[in-house]
Image (spheres, rainbow, N blue to C red):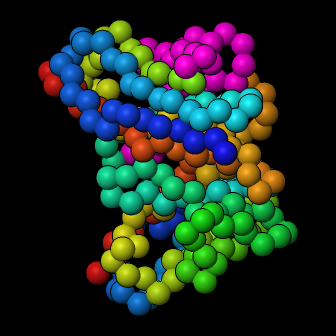
Amino acid sequence: AQSVSQHNHHVILSEAASLELGCNYSYGGTVNLFWYVQYPGQHLQLLLKYFSGDPLVKGIKGFEAEFIKSKFSFNLRKPSVQWSDTAEYFCAVIRFSGGYNKLIFGAGTRLAVHP
Amino acid sequence: SAVISQKPSRDICQRGTSLTIQCQVDSQVTMMFWYRQQPGQSLTLIATANQGSEATYESGFVIDKFPISRPNLTFSTLTVSNMSPEDSSIYLCSVPTPRGSNYGYTFGSGTRLTVV
């Protein structure tokens, strides 16, 4: 079954630093991958997704992620973070189970950006 | 993308009581998903609600504790029954958006439940 692992639970950066959050998935054939963000007190928002095609996916707010099949990874990157990027970031994968496609989340990474 | 209205947005409940959470979608969807987000943790899928059939529960979740209704293609409820403080969480519903360039999942704003 598809599952997803996020190894960085807490990340602290200064503004303008570069960001890379790790996400690894378990093998299971075709993969559909997502990154969601949850700002403090707000609901989940989709940052970007990968289904097929160009493995470098660009999302909103300057985020991008690269699908590397050989490494089973889908890491999230941003070249220069801002204080407003302080949030929790979730990697997710679609798992086909019980006759349905289900969205399964990683444990999340809490990012704190200091001015 | 679909728009989901979820209510209540928050509630404080006494242990032993039950709370029913509602999700209304602005378009017809075959499947709706219910998640739980415990404090400081990720989202865990509780069950999949398919209109016209029994909900399918994930491991660790049972119908007696989390009964789900799905009376039509735009509405679903999740009940948290016989609550205990361990049920204090954010509960969210989610629907898949249609296939195509916009394919993904949309989430409700969540119900923050505190059991005292």
Q: Residue at x 54, y 15 (%)?
A: A66
Please say if B66 is above or below B97. below
Residue positioned 47% across, 29% down in the render:
A23
In the image, is residue B87 above or below residue A28? below
Quarter of the figure with residue A26: top right
Q: Position of residue A115 (x, y in %)?
A: 14, 21
Q: Is residue A54 magenta?
A: yes
User: Quick check: B104 left or right of A91?
Assistant: right
User: Is B49 on the left-hand or right-hand side of A19?
Assistant: right
Residue at position x 61%, y 76% in the image:
B62
Tell me where residue A114 sits by quadrant: top left
Residue in the foreground of this view, choosing between B77 and A30? A30
* Residue B86 sits in quarter: bottom left
Left or right, B101 with respect to A92, comes to right
x%, y% of residue A98? 77, 57
- At horizontal 21% and vertical 28% (from top left) the residue drawn is A12
- Residue A3 in view in this figure: yes
Please name whichever residue, B41 or A112, is drawn nearer the observer in this view of the structure. Answer: B41
Q: Position of residue B47 (x, y in %)?
A: 64, 63
Which region is colored magenta?
A42-71
Q: Is residue A15 above or below residue A87?
A: above
